[in-house]
């Protein structure tokens, strides 16, 4: 109340004191424009003074244009007060820590060439939005609200929405994963899941072993936490076993991070027997595995292969990260971690400390969508759609692009290694002028010298994959923009590209490769 702090003095006319008090309130910001003042009768009662004194003060202020009286409504402040400010400036760039600087440096949204309207973009590996069965999703949203109502808008549980957790348990059992003594934590997609695990279970300078090449987001997170990344070569069956054992023996890694299904970016699916051998080697050296269950539903040539987690039985040596966002509703950002019960208990606390919980409205809606069988129908329909696109992309690549090797057995992307050591960054610059974008392959490799971090990989680990042979790549001790690992590779994402643009875009890429080859 504006007048609760006014103490009337006998040494000065009361109306002047009221007038000054209102002006002071405006100046201090306590009274803002359009604020309603108490009526003259209310003020006289509050201050125990004559109403005439209040009327005199109001009339004086109104004559000055400071307040305005609206008949039958009340009296209001009609001017803006002075906005006092006391500026000081901080150079926040000097205060950013290593974590922030590395994530900023490796932010491909900022650092890579941006998409412009009308371009043909092969950068994304997201699903095609028009394939989403929106009517099923709308029904699921209504079902969620019918059963949960306002509970969905209140605080939930860090661990996740219980029915969705139970659904994912059944989902993992269908993949022949033993869930005894295991639990599930719902996360905001793969990125948060991986970040929670890495931040909770590793320390700076720990070694993480992964495939070469591997998921750019995972590389970025590992580097941001100061971890040393050792990449092991792939062949068409998966991780090369000899190189894997050498790396396990030499580096004593804290974890292995693997994408056995549709490795991002190569699209290689590690075969069943190779998965068993890989698992046995990690078990032999007592190194736990973080398994990224990436796009497991989109295998075009055969049935999906059981995850490595299925080989663990009642053991707890594999932490499984699941997400359906690369084929369905990536905007929902729903993923999960399946791991040892005691571990999930810790990770739940980490999750709670970060963002309390993932959206219960999203989780509940997604649960009713999955429960209805809509997801199974969706996958059945889109598998043929994406298989046809995949086949078209492969045909166009074989027609226009002189490749040394090409990989990809499913999912929404193809990985290409060019002949004649063509630099794909130079190729991208030319294609960009022709309104075509793709993802250069070097971002999926451990180019540590980019960040002036000591190179830790030995020469035998710095390798790349082809269909039938292993290509050695020299060790990098100093940064050289022309000597990046993966500099002659690139990824084609086709999920959201029309057939016409696939034909046109890949031909443009091929034409520019020919131009570079002729230089």
Image (tube, helix red, strand yellow):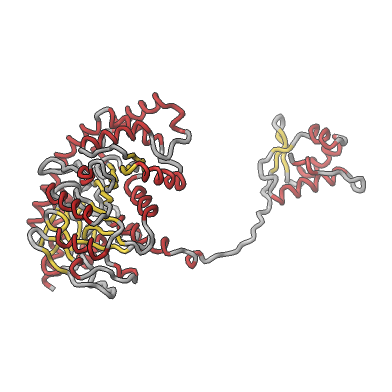
Asked if one can make out residue 110 in the rendered structure from this viewpoint, the answer is yes
Q: Is residue 150 above or below residue 426?
A: above
**For the point 16% across and 60% down, which residue is it?**
509
Q: Quadrant of the C terminus?
A: bottom left
**For the point 47% across and 36% down, which residue is it?**
155
Pick the residue in front: 282 or 512: 282
Q: Give coordinates of residue 498: x percent, y percent.
A: 19, 46
Q: Give coordinates of residue 199: x percent, y percent.
A: 39, 54
- Report whether 165 appears left or right of 356: left
The residue most toward the top is: 146
- Report whether 81 appears left or right of 355: right
Pick the residue in front: 330 or 197: 197
Q: Count every numbered label the image shows and give the total.
A: 0
Q: Quadrant of the N terminus?
A: top right
The residue most toward the right is: 11
Q: Is residue 61 above or below residue 208?
A: above
Q: Give coordinates of residue 513: x percent, y percent.
A: 14, 65
Q: Give coordinates of residue 287: x percent, y percent.
A: 27, 55
Pick the residue in front: 395 or 44: 395
**For the point 46% across and 42% down, which residue is it?**
356
Quarter assignment of residue 129: top left
Pick the residue in front: 377 or 512: 377
Asked if one can make out residue 121 in the rendered structure from this viewpoint, the answer is no
């Amino acid at each position: 109340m504006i007048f609760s702090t006014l103490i009337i003095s006998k040494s000065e006319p009361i109306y002047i004191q009221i007038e000054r008090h209102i002006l002071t309130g405006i100046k201090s910001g306590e009274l803002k424009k359009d604020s309603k003042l108490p009526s003259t009768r209310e003020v006289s009662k509050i201050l125990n003074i004559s109403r005439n004194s209040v009327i005199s003060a109001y009339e004086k202020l109104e004559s000055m244009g400071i307040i305005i009286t609206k008949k039958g409504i009340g009296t209001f402040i009609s001017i803006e007060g002075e906005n006092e400010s006391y500026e000081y400036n901080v150079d926040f760039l000097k205060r950013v820590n290593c974590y922030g600087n590395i994530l900023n440096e490796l932010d491909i949204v900022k650092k890579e060439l941006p998409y412009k309207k009308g371009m043909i973009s092969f950068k994304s590996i997201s699903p095609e939005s028009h394939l989403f069965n929106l009517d099923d999703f709308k029904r699921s949203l209504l079902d969620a609200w019918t059963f949960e109502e306002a509970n969905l808008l209140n605080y939930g549980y860090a661990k996740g929405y219980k029915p969705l957790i139970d659904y994912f348990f059944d989902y993992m059992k269908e993949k022949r994963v033993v869930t005894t003594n295991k639990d599930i934590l719902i996360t905001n997609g793969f990125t948060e899941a991986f970040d929670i695990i890495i931040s909770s279970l590793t320390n700076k300078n720990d070694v993480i072993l992964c495939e070469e090449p591997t998921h750019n987001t995972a590389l970025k997170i590992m580097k941001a936490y100061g971890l040393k990344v050792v990449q092991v070569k792939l062949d068409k069956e998966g991780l090369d076993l000899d190189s894997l054992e050498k790396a396990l023996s030499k580096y004593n890694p804290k974890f292995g991070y693997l994408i056995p299904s549709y490795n991002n970016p190569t699209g290689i699916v590690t075969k069943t027997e190779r998965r068993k051998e890989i698992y046995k080697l990690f078990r032999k050296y007592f190194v736990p595995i973080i398994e990224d269950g990436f796009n497991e539903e989109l295998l075009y040539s055969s049935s999906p292969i059981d995850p490595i987690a299925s080989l663990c039985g009642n053991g707890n040596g594999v932490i499984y990260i699941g997400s359906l966002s690369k084929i369905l509703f990536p905007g929902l950002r729903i993923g999960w971690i399946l791991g040892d019960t005691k571990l999930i208990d810790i990770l739940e606390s980490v999750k709670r400390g970060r963002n309390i919980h993932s959206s219960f409205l999203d989780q509940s809606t997604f649960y009713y969508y999955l429960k209805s069988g809509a997801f199974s129908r969706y996958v059945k329909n889109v598998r043929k759609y994406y298989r046809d696109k995949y086949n078209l992309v492969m045909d166009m690549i074989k027609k226009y692009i002189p490749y040394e090797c090409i990989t990809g057995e499913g999912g929404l992307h193809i990985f290409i290694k060019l002949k004649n050591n063509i630099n794909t960054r130079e190729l991208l610059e030319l294609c960009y002028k022709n309104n075509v974008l793709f993802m250069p392959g070097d971002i999926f490799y451990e180019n540590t010298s980019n960040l002036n971090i000591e190179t830790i990989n030995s020469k035998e680990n710095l390798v790349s994959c082809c269909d039938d042979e292993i290509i050695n790549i020299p060790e990098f001790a100093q940064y050289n923009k022309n000597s990046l690992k993966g500099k002659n590779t690139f990824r084609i994402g086709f999920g959201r590209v029309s057939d016409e643009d696939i034909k046109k875009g890949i031909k443009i890429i091929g034409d520019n490769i020919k131009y570079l080859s002729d230089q």
